[in-house]
Amino acid sequence: MKKTILAIFLAGLWITASEFIRNELLFKSFWVNHFNSLGLKFETLPINGILWMVWSFLFAYFILKLLEVFSFGKTFWLSWLAAFVMMWITIYNLQVLPMGILIAAIPLSILEITVAELIINKFNK
């Protein structure tokens, strides 16, 4: 049980850091400019950070549960589809996805899930 909690905690920290670096440090200007072009204001509020942390730890748990049933590869594809592809479709449908961001977001999301799976595999044994 302790190993499972540690695996989820470490993978959740990794996912949180990955999301923060991608969306706040690397691509915030994409988001701000796109929202401005829509007549909206892109804000980073504490509640947003808290919700992304919750999302990250839930996602780590989701990956852990998938790894209990599926191979590394199947877990990767299922988690990538569920977390990222479906999110991109949703925010595209809401017309708030800056499409240019996907050039970098796709490989970074692949890296994010791969490292999270490796962390879970290492610490949940």
Image (tube, grey):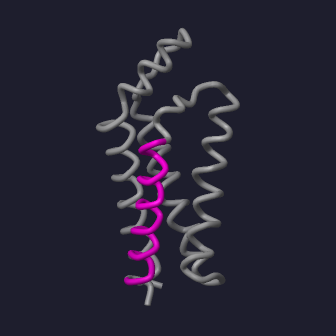
The vertical placement of 66 against 31, above or below, is: below
- Asked if 109 appears above or below 100 in the picture, the reply is below
116 drawn magenta: yes
Above or below: residue 97 compared with residue 49 = above
Q: Position of residue 75 (x, y in %)?
A: 59, 73
- Left or right: where 99 falls relative to 3: right
The magenta stretch spans which residues? 103-122
Q: Residue furthest left?
A: 25
**Placement of the C terminus among the 4 image quadrants:** bottom left
Number of numbered tags placed on the structure image: 0
Provide the major secondary structure of the magenta segment: helix
Residue that protrudes farthest toward the top in the picture: 39
* Percent x, y of residue 28: 36, 30
Q: Is residue 77 left or right of residue 22?
A: right
Residue 22 belongs to the span the image colors magenta: no
Q: Determine the residue positioned at 54% across, 32% down.
A: 99
Residue name at image x 40 percent, y 28 percent: 44
Q: Residue at x 59, y 54 (%)?
A: 83
Residue 1 lies, in percent from the top left, at 48, 85
**For this rendering, which residue is in front, 115 or 50?**
115
Residue for point 65% across, 57% down: 82
In x, y percent, where is residue 43? Answer: 43, 23
